[in-house]
Amino acid sequence: MNEAGPAPTRRGASDCIVLGAGLIGLSTALHLRWLGLSVRVLERGRVGDGTSTRSSGWISASLRTPNSLLELVVASLRYFPELIARLDDSCGHATCGTLVLFDTEEQLAQRRLLDQEQRKVAAYGGARFLDAREVRELEPAVAPAIVGGAWAPDDAEVDPIRLVAALHRAAVAAGVAVQQGAEAQVVEADGAGWRVTTPIGTYTADKLVNAAGAWSPAVAELAGLELEVIPVAGQLLVS
C-alpha cells in the first residue's frame, strides 16, 4: 500500500492568487484589492521581469481588429487618466496619437476598409485619413514615397517601467502580498478553490488568475488546462 506524503502546508489563504507580477498581474491584483478582496501575487522571478518592462508602452486602438479586444483597448484609453491619478505618478502617460503611413494607394484603400469595420465598435471614433501634404505637415521627415496616412489622435503611450513600479508600490501599500521567487510548480484544485505550490511555500485561495503572459500556457498546463497563447515579437526603434 502506498503511503501518502506529508500534507501540503496551507499558507496565507486569500481570496485570490495572481500568478505573475507584470503589468497585467499587478493591475489585476490592485483592482481586486480596491474591491476589498485579499490578494496574493506569486512571481517566479522579479517584479516586471518578463515582457512588461520590455514593451513599447503603446496604448493603441487603431491597429486592432473590430472585436472585443478593440472594445477593451478603447476602454483602457479612457480609463488610464483615472488610473494614473490614483497611482499618483504620471508614468509618462501622454495622448500622442498614432500615424500609420502608406506608400501605395492600394494600402490606403485597404486601411479605409479596416477603418469601416473598426467603426462598427460603437466606442471607437475611427481614424482621420490624410493625403501626402497633410502627412508631411504632421511629420515632415517621412519618406518621399509616402502617399497618405491614417491618423488616430486618441492613441496614447506610457512608460512601462515606471508603470510597473507604480503598480507595485500601490499594490503593496493597499495590502497586496507580492512574493518574488515564487514560481508555480504545482497548480491544483483545492475543494472549491486552488492550491499553488512554489519553492517558498504552498498557498491557497478561492480564485486563481493566470497572468503569466507568454508563459501562461505552461502555467495552465500545470492545472491540466490548455490555453492557446501565441507570442508575437515586434521591433522597437529608440530615438
Image (cartoon, grey):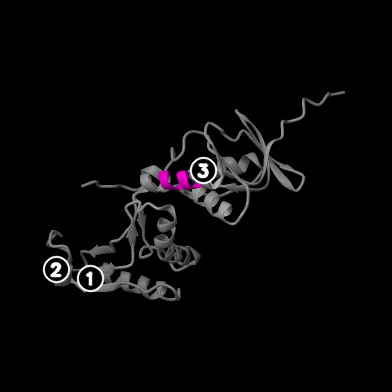
Which residue bears the numbered disc 3? 172
Task: Tell whether position 63 is magenta.
Answer: no
| Residue 169 location (% of width, % of height) | 46, 44
Q: What count of labels does the image hold?
A: 3
Q: Residue at x 84, y 24 (%)?
A: 2
| Residue 22 location (% of width, % of height) | 47, 44
Viewer-nearest residue: 147 or 215 = 215
Binning the other alpha carbons within 10 Å of mark 1 as few (below 14), some (14 to 19) or many (20 upward) gives few
Mark number for residue 105?
Answer: 1
Task: State which tag comes first along the sequence, 1 or 3.
Answer: 1
Binning the other alpha carbons within 10 Å of mark 2 as few (below 14), some (14 to 19) or many (20 upward) gives few
| Residue 117 location (% of width, % of height) | 41, 73
Q: Are marks 1 and 3 in contact (CB under 8 Å)?
A: no
Mark number for residue 133?
Answer: none
Q: Amino acid at mark 1?
A: Glu
| Residue 196 location (% of width, % of height) | 65, 37
Q: Main secondary structure of the magenta part?
A: helix
Gap in Å between the C-alphas at discs 1 and 3?
Answer: 52 Å
Task: State which tag comes first along the sequence, 2 or 3.
Answer: 2
Write down the region rendered in magenta.
165-171
Mark number for residue 137?
Answer: 2
In the depicted structure, whether residue 53 falls above or below residue 102: above
Q: Is residue 228 left or right of residue 57?
A: right
| Element class at badge 2 | helix
